[in-house]
Amino acid sequence: MTAILLVGFALLTLWPAYNLALVAFSAGDAATAGHRRRRDAIAPNGNEPQTFWIVVPALNEERVVGRTVGAALALSGPEGTRTRVLVVDDGSDDGTPDVLAAIDHPGLTVLRRDFPNARQGKGEALNAAFRAIRDLSLANGEDPDRVAVGVIDGDGRGSANLLSEISRLMRDPGVGAVQVRVRIHNRNRVLGAVQDLEFAAIANASQLLRDAAGTVGLGGNGQFARLSSLMRLGHAPWSHCLVEDLELGLRMHLNGERIRYTSIAHVQQQGLVDVKRLVRQRTRWAQGNLQCIAYVPRLVASRKIRNHALLEMLYYLLAPWMNAFGTAAVFGLWGYSAWQLLPGHGETFLIHSWSQLAEVLLFFAVGMTVPGLVWAGVHRYQLRDEKFSVLLRAALAYPFFLMLGLVSTWRAIGRQVARRNAWAKTERLAEEPVAA
């Protein structure tokens, strides 16, 4: 066994070991979910929301916004609550305004933003929605503690139990926000299926672990916060960061707010089935993660975050960059070792034969493939709504999906160094029109 094989073994075993730990935790959560739901299903105590606002940020969403708004208006919470939908039309120049104008419903409010305020990022659109909801709620004499503000993207669909589950968790007055599970609805394509495996199984298990540690992060889709918690963050709770949801979660934790996660309710969204667009999206996410590293000193200095929670948050923020640099270092060593194996290049380096190099690469391939297969089994066992053949294809494609993530991480570093923060909006796929 060569030294490079030992280094590769050390790096690669951490990845499957971490995944197996998540699988074990996820399985345990699934086994006790029913008991915990019965335990937590207490009678209303005056802390749960009375009004649910669902914010739909829309910029050129004519292909999907009609169905999204219709689905959001159809959501209902526990008896005695009401549901309102606020669409932020952020300067759309397609048919989005016409689609919205055709929806006649008393629960719908459309907030149109035009130049120069429009198109300053999703965070600013959400801030405009927050201020409108805050002003309306206060004018109506509503208690901000009992108003929940949720975000469902222009391509999102909430599960029927979404608001009831938010209400259940917000019966705890210490809970300032809730994040729900995310699913991909166009998983008939391989890339869509891989993203559903990522969100519905892997990210779900990670969030469950973070829920136990008290470090849940907010996602761009399916996040709900108390209006009072958002108000404590000032006039603009969301930021200009490229992943405004990640930064909002960090700010809420620093403010002493508790964030919960639930796997029982979900929001479905479109997956990206074009590799170029997927890399662009993940590059934006990675660059936003890089921008949020600026919060590390504040997290370390905070007295409101416990030590074990701090370690988990630091891991979440720093792990992508350690993985990127570590993988690049290993690949660099392998490349140099292969170069030294060529005739006339002097003594070999670490790997002394082509057969040894083949063994190393085989070991790497197995280490990258096994976790995806395990997660496919977890997905099938927990959700039971997808054919195993589809999940198997997704699992086999998962290692290549991870490689795209590494490419995106390095692109994000380049963009951050070059101070490039502008992004073109990802185009939606066409969907069936809303049923009459």
Image: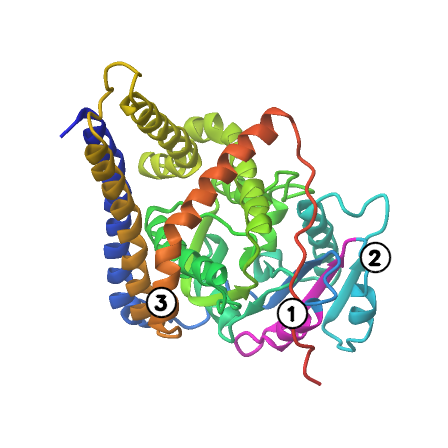
Asked whether residue 385 is in view, the answer is yes
Q: In 3D space, how far apart are the residues under numbered discs 3 and 2 (Cα atoms)?
A: 46 Å
The colour scheme is rainbow
Q: Which residues are magenta?
A: 66-90
Residue 277 in percent (x, y) is at 60, 50
Residue 421 in percent (x, y) is at 66, 35
Residue 10 in percent (x, y) is at 22, 33
Of mark 2 and mark 1, the one earlier in the sequence is 1
Q: In 3D space, how far apart are the residues under numbered discs 2 and 1 (Cα atoms)?
A: 19 Å
Circle 1 sits in a helix, a strand or a loop, which is it? helix
User: Which residue, given by chain and number where applicable, does mark 3 sit on?
Assistant: 40
Towards the viewer: 174 or 377: 377
Report the amino acid beneath label 2.
Asp
Towards the viewer: 134 or 19: 19
Q: Quadrant of residue 55?
A: bottom right
User: Which residue, given by chain and number where applicable, does mark 2 sit on?
Assistant: 93
